[in-house]
Structures are given as C-alpha cells and as structure tokens.
Image (cartoon, helix red, strand yellow):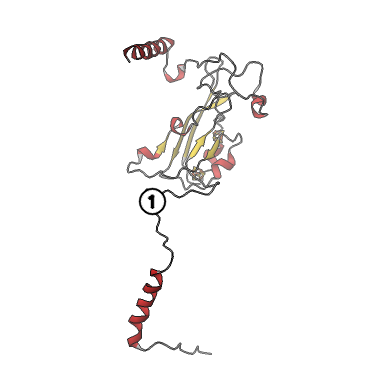
C-alpha cells in the first residue's frame, strides 16, 4: 500500500523554522574544544604513540622477534633482530631489536602489534600529537620509541645482572641495575673505547669551561 504523503508546513513558515534550529543551538552547551591551547585528557587505554619498554635495570625488553611486524595490518613496522654478546648486550636473552621503526604515515593505531608482542616490550602511550609535514619525520626510529631511563637503570648496552638468567628478568626478580654496572662500548654502532674516552674528555673540558 502506498504511504500517505507527510503533511508539510506552508511555504512561508520554512525560513522561520530554519532560524528556530539556529536559535535553539545558541543556548546549548558549547562543544568547541580549544585545542591546542587546552588539551583533552585521553581515556586511560587510549591508543597513542608506541613505546619500547625496558627492564628495571635498563636492558631492553624487545627480543627482535618481528611478531609485531607480522601482526600489523598496515605493514607499518620494520624490525631487524641481532645477537647479543657479553661485550655488547642490549637485552637479557639471546637476541635484541637492532633496528626498530614504526611508520606513522601508515599506522592506524589499531593496537594489534602490542597484542602480538610476547615480552610486553611494545605498548602504546597516550601521546596523540603525531602530525608532521614530512613523511620522513613520520618514521619513528628505535631511539625515538625507546623508553627513557628511570631510577636504577643504566643505558644499554650493559651486562646482565650477575647470577641471573633471562627468566629471572621476566619473573620480576631483577629490580634495578647491579651496583657498578657501566655502559658497554657499542661496537656494532661504530663506537670505540677511544671515542668514548674522547667524549668523556670533552665533557670534562666543558665542565671546566663552565
Ligand atoms: S597500531 Fe596497528 S597499524 Fe599501527 S603499527 Fe601497530 S598493528 Fe600496525
Ligand atoms: S616489540 Fe615485541 S613483538 Fe616486536 S620485535 Fe620486539 S619483542 Fe618482538
């Protein structure tokens, strides 16, 4: 059965009805957000920029397994793993993430990568200000994604806590760097002991100048 045509207002009332909508809106609570002057607090589990986490002594949790890269539907993650050595150690186990990149021109912040990570090395922060005018700047490197150092941590590479194993780290038995832990020379990154000595000398000189 055909629907009855709806009753329409007489033509002269239409403009008045339109202003009625505007008039009502004038007294509603404003929804305008004064961004960026006033930033809205995000939900606690908001999916923002990623972070590569550390163990409590500063060693990295990433083992370079690439599971996050395989889980990513946008092909936004690039990982290259490498072997740790006793002279240059970045994580407690056998392997670490030597190269780690996330391309935020591709990432849709879905969180599948953090679900796939077996070590909770990769999590997401509440930071959402990721816009940039350069594609190159949107590729975040490991150095940008790696968490900063908290109290009790030493920058990598450095040795494993003496007398512990990789499992002890995941059981939470290592709570800070062992006394006397020092940063090792990152030979794989082109550092030399002499170079480090030069840097130390420069820092000392700067202190004297200051
Ligand atoms: S949040 Fe989603 S799109 Fe972004 S890197 Fe992770 S898996 Fe890929
Ligand atoms: S972040 Fe997690 S899943 Fe990705 S390579 Fe590192 S350990 Fe593997």
Q: Is residue 73 above or below residue 161?
A: below
What is the x, y in percent for residue 134?
33, 41
Q: For mark 1, does the 10 Å Cα neighbourhood hold few (<14), some (14 to 19), or many (20 or more) residues? A: few
Give the side of residue 122 with respect to residue 202, left or right: right
- Residue 158 horizontal side relative to residue 12, left or right: right
Q: Nearer the viewer, residue 162 or 80?
A: 162
How many numbered circles are shown? 1
Ligand 1 neighbours mark 1 (CB distance < 8 Å)? no
Q: Residue furthest front?
A: 27
Query: Where residue 137 sits: x, y (%)?
Result: 36, 38
Q: Give the quarter of the figure containing the C terminus.
A: top left
Would you identify the image quadrant in which residue 206 lies?
top left
The residue closer to the viewer here, 8 or 195, is 8
31 in relation to 48, above or below: below
Q: Left of 14 or right of it: where is 72?
A: right
Residue shown at 37%/14% (left/top)? 203
Give the residue drawn at x 43%, y 20%.
189
Is 69 rendered above or below residue 35?
above
What residue would you read off at disc 1? 35
**Residue 157 spot, x, y in % from top left:** 51, 20
Q: Quadrant of residue 153?
A: top right
What x and y, as percent, mark residue 208? 34, 11
Secondary structure under the numbered disc 1 in the rendered image: loop
Q: Residue at x 42, y 60 (%)?
A: 31
């Amino acid at each position: 059965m055909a629907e009855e045509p709806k009753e329409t207002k007489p033509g002269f009332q239409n403009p008045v009805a339109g202003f009625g909508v505007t008039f009502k809106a004038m007294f509603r609570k404003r929804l305008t957000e004064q961004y960026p002057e006033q930033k809205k607090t995000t939900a606690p589990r908001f999916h923002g920029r990623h972070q590569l986490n550390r163990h409590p002594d500063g060693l990295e949790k990433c083992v370079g397994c690439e599971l996050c890269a395989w889980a990513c539907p946008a092909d936004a993650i690039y990982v290259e793993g490498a072997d740790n050595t006793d002279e240059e150690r970045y994580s407690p186990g056998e392997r670490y993430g030597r190269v780690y990149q996330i391309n935020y021109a591709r990432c849709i912040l879905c969180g599948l990568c953090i679900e796939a990570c077996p070590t909770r090395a990769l999590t997401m922060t509440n930071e959402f200000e990721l816009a940039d005018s350069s594609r190159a700047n949107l590729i975040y490197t490991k150095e940008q994604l790696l968490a900063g150092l908290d109290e009790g941590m030493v920058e990598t590479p450095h040795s494993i806590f003496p007398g512990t194993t990789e499992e002890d780290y995941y059981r939470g038995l290592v709570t800070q760097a062992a006394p006397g832990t020092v940063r090792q020379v990152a030979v794989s990154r082109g550092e030399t002991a002499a170079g480090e000595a030069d840097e130390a000398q420069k820092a000392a000189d700067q202190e004297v100048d200051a």
